[in-house]
Amino acid sequence: MSSAVEPTAKTGMGAIREWITVIGVALLIAFVVRGFVLQQFYISGPSMESTMFQNNRVLVNKLSYRLHDIHRGDVVVFDRVTTDGVEVQHDDLIKRVIGVAGDTVSISNCVVSVNGSEVDEPYLNDYDLAQTNLEDRCRVPEMVSTIVEPGHLFVMGDNRPQSFDSRMFGTIEEDLVVGRAFVIIWPLGSFDWL
């Protein structure tokens, strides 16, 4: 005859300690994931329409670029540091990578070229492309060739008439990249892989 040992329910201080441990471990895991693996970002402006819209939330893989290089076409979040001479401000911006180290980027009649070849950009808004006034179509219709230095990226928003990007502030340092945006998670009906 076997005698089964019944588990005893923890009561009092033992149960409280167990709950505190479970909550502590869960919080630790959440902080590690948010700090080093995944983070959600809020889209606050129109610069990436029609790929993503204001009030969308995206998940960003913060580990991705520790394992491989940044590629043209990736959508990245980066820390843009600005100063007015007194205060230093940090803004998280989201843009598409157009040029990587060693690339030559130019714009002629709103057409972006990298290394002399026109960039295929199916993500651009058809309405903007139909505009006859070049500045309405792309904000910066002409840009002399820019060579992307080692450790830098040339980034642009998908909504060219509304985006403040490398056409205005120049290339960004790769070290400022937080991670690669890979999915729209909010609002619920707009879930989409990037």
Image (tube, helix red, strand yellow):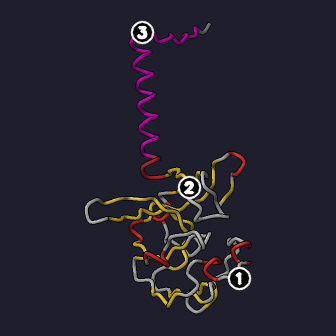
Q: Which residue does the image show at 35% across and 59% down from the upper left?
A: 89
Q: Residue furthest bottom?
A: 116
Of marks 1 and 3, the one in the foreground: 1
Residue 180 lies, with reference to residue 70, above or below; the image says above
Residue 103 lies, with reference to residue 39, above or below; the image says below
> x, y (%) of residue 18?
43, 21
The secondary structure that most of the magenta stretch takes on is helix
Considering depth in this image, is 41 or 45 the residue closer to the camera? Answer: 45
- Place residue 43 in its image quadrant: bottom right
Dot 2 falls on a residue whose secondary structure is loop
Q: Quadrant of the N terminus?
A: top right
Of marks 2 and 1, the one in the foreground: 1
Cα gap from disc 2 to disc 1, whole angstroms: 29 Å
Q: Residue furthest left?
A: 86
Residue 12 in magenta stretch: yes
Q: Tell me, for residue 43, which label it has, or none.
A: 2
Q: Amino acid at mark 3?
A: Gly
Of marks 3 and 2, the one in the foreground: 2
Q: Are marks 3 and 2 in contact (CB under 8 Å)?
A: no
Q: Which residue is mark 1?
A: 132
Mark closer to the chain start, 2 or 1: 2
Q: Amino acid at mark 1?
A: Thr
Q: Which residue is mark 3?
A: 12
Cα gap from disc 1 to disc 3, whole angstroms: 75 Å
> x, y (%) of residue 37?
48, 52
Dot 3 falls on a residue whose secondary structure is loop
Q: Is residue 33 left or right of residue 163?
A: left
Mark closer to the chain start, 3 or 2: 3
Q: Which residue does the image show at 58% across and 8% down from the upper left?
A: 3
Residue 80 lies, with reference to residue 149, above or below; the image says above
Q: Are marks 2 and 1 in contact (CB under 8 Å)?
A: no
> What is the magenta range?
3-32
